[in-house]
Image (spheres, grey):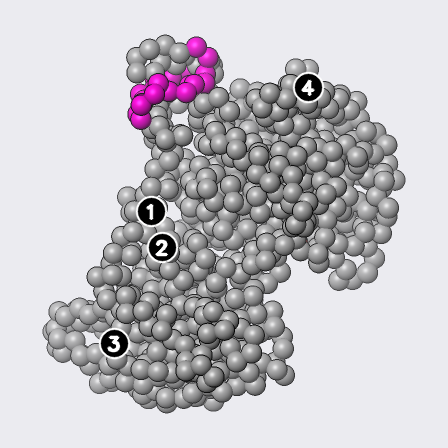
Amino acid sequence: MTYGHFDDRRREYVITRPDTPLPWINYLGCEAYFGIISNTAGGYSFYRDARLRRLTRYRYNNVPPDVGGRYLYVRDDETGDFWSPTWQPTRHDPEDYTCRHGMGYTVIGSARKGVRADICYFVPLGADLEIWQLTVSNKGRRPRRLSLFSSIEFCLWDAQDDATNFQRNFSTGQVEVERGVIYHKTEYRERRNHVAFFACSEKPAGTDTQREAFLGPYRGWDKPLAVERGRSFNSVAHGWAPIGSHHVRLALAPGETRTVTYILGYSENPRDAKFDPPGSQTIDKRGIRRVLDRYRDAAAVAKAFEELRSSWEGLLDVYRVRTPVRHVDRMVNIWNPYQCMATFNMSRSASMFESGIGRGLGFRDSTQDLLGFVHMVPARARERILDLAATQLATGGAYHQYQPLTKRGNNDIGSNFNDDPLWLIVGVAAYIRETGDWSLLDEAVPYDNAPGSETPLYEHCTRSIRYTLDRLGPHGLPLIGRADWNDCLNLNCFSETPGESFQTTTNREGRVAESVFIAALFVLAARELSAIASRRGREAESGEYLQHADRMEQVVREHGWDGEWFLRAYDASGGRVGSASCGEGKIFIESQGFCVLAGIGTQDGRARKALDAVRKHLATPHGIMLQQPAFSRYYVELGEISSYPPGYKENAGIFCHNNPWVMIAETVLGNGDAALDYYLRINPSARERLARLHRCEPYVYAQMIAGKDAPTHGEAKNSWLTGTAAWNYYAITQWILGIRPTFEGLQVAPVVPARWKEFSVRRVFRGVTYDIDVVRVGKGNSVRLTVDGRPVDGTVLGVPPAGATALRVRAEIS
Ligand code: BGC
Ligand code: NOJ
């Protein structure tokens, strides 16, 4: 059973019943003003930082679920009947309910007793506001008199404080209402210079700004008193809970359609020019009025919507594919890059599973997100790399997270996640491969944001390598520190205290526990840096990095191989983790996927052996589990991984982020059938038919699908904000379909299933459009290329002739 369907032509997912298993969300905004919106209009908005500049209130983990949103009520003024076209919050039986989640917009609507209402929600490019454009039609034969009530609830800016500090906040709320526009100005009297505004294109008959007045005593959003009685109270919030609501009356002739535009936005004034007149306590609204004048005009709104659509068309045009499998085409052409934009923008901050309070931008998360984003907006990727590198420490270490508003490293979580610094090199290499912009390496970037400490970015990369080399353990493998990619493998934590953070508590000195995963990442990163150094004419350094990589590979061969697969780690007592000799947790996915991806074991048969072991012990129809057997009890020496019941998250869940490592590894060994098979097991579109089991959105990846040890095997959790997006995109586009940017040019090296006869890709790369037709003429993966009819040596298309803007490439694989 499904809850909707894909509309690929419009690049939308169409939800046809509102009671989806979980709220199925979309993101609004992609620059500074953002929101999440569910299929029933739940969600919230914020400016840049989901914690510190939250405009509207949302109640996570509430019942009924998903309350707090962008709600409109339609009221029949003859009968008093009222309902929400978005189903929530009134939850009347809707007629013809649809929610169309598209690229940066969502349209939700339904009908009731002859009145059809649809609301299109989006954030115009370049604007710090969101538009709700309501279209309401009288489908019947008699005239209708309707009332519309809008509603939002303001969050008092700092979402953490808003949810906890009631003794203060119940006295600080303030608003202004002027000519029907509602201004939320809590704390503006003191240190804030920003306000929120909520306006409507029609002249309202009334407004409300105090929640209790609008709702009435002991009522919820499903039955506001103002809506029930058909008239606002014109309440003005002072303390308690400021909200925004407009009452608009409409008379609709039979067949008539009207549009009404609502505008919710954020605005800042200069600190010394906050008030008008100066010296008063009244907000200077001149800037806001100008913005409102613009967007109250329906033609301007239509134009802004068109701009958003065509901007997405441009972003998605960079890589377009036609293959024999529609789940590949749909995810590659539409939803996977779209999700990559969300992960780039949000990191892991705001979703249905991330409250927007806890987490800044992760160092390793954001660097990996670049793999799926850099081709869309390279300039923003560049800026992100420089921001991240500026939080790097002089030792080469990295803060685990930084705050987007301040761009400073976050000291609450600190550092010593020993994989973090190496990901910087992965991100830098991806950027240069895509753009050919070597000047990035020369940018002067500070350490820990300290003025005067700047070195060229290249040196940051060298310090990342040094950081690992300075922290090797008894076997010569990298020390794990607090954790490596697996945040839950806390080998120095030894926590016995309830509630203590596994990630930030360290009870052992940490000179023993080592990570095979970091060793593999090091091999990859050191080879990348060697390639970069050599292309910069630093041959001696290049040779050194190569030697370091080779030496580490040797160490992995000696101490990181368990006999049938790669070991995962050594614990704080030097015991093996992820070994056949362990009682539980005998084999882990990370070291199998990443060692092979880094080229370890490809010469001596171990790589194949490791991947066969993955297939045998870890693969399920729903994806590849993180480890097996699941930990049935808590192991203090392993940490959080054993805190989860078997089958969930890092304890033997299907952690979708690392499945692509195995897909790529299979392509490295030339096995396109296995790679695509794994790809399709977790591909959201391919899982749409399992919607009742899968439960999360069928158009984006979730971080986790419950593993075979869980009673809910196959159920997804934590959709949207996960490295899964970038890694799957990278695996399918660059390794399976094999269209891969290199330092020298675009490579064409597909490793696709034997049964695929042909596929084609249009790739815009460094300003040139490559139309690539791949045709299978034999069973293997050898490639013969011709460009505009002329044969080319090898698989890399070098710099095209001057002036060339479009090339036709034919690739024969045999
Ligand atoms: C989760 C990890 C996550 C970590 C972040 C843990 O509880 O299981 O997936 O990376 O928290 O702090
Ligand atoms: C989610 C975190 O965001 C990511 O950084 C980490 O690698 C995985 N969990 C695995 O623990």
> Which image quarter is the C terminus in?
top left
- Closer to the eye: label 3 or 4: 4
For the point 37% across and 89% down, the residue is: 233
At numbered mark 1, what does the secondary structure look like: helix, strand or loop?
A: helix
Relative vertical location of residue 644 with respect to residue 578 in this rendering, above or below:
below
Q: Are marks 2 and 1 in contact (CB under 8 Å)?
A: yes
Give the magenta range: 793-814
Residue at image coords 66%, 15%:
603
Amino acid type for the residue under numbered disc 2: Leu
- Left or right, 179 with respect to 480, comes to left
SS for callout 3? loop
User: In the image, which disc is placed on residue 254?
Assistant: none
Q: CA distance from mark 3 to mark 4?
A: 70 Å
Q: Which residue is mark 1?
A: 311
Residue at horizontal 56%, vertical 69%? 159
Is the residue indicated by label 4 positioned so its CB lies within 8 Å of ligand 2? no
**Would the CB of label 1 be found within 8 Å of ligand 2?**
no
Would you name the residue on which mark 3 appears?
202
Horizontal and vertical percent for residue 175? 45, 82
Marks 2 and 1 sit apart, C-alpha to C-alpha, by 9 Å
* Residue 500 image point, x, y percent: 77, 60
User: What secondary structure is found at the residue carrying circle 2?
Assistant: loop
Q: Which mark sits nearer the N-terminus, 4 or 1?
A: 1
Tell me, for residue 125, which label it has, or none. 2
Q: Amino acid at mark 3?
A: Glu
Q: In this orientation, which residue lies closer to the viewer: 669 or 16? A: 669
Question: Mark 4 or mark 1, which is nearer to you?
Answer: 4
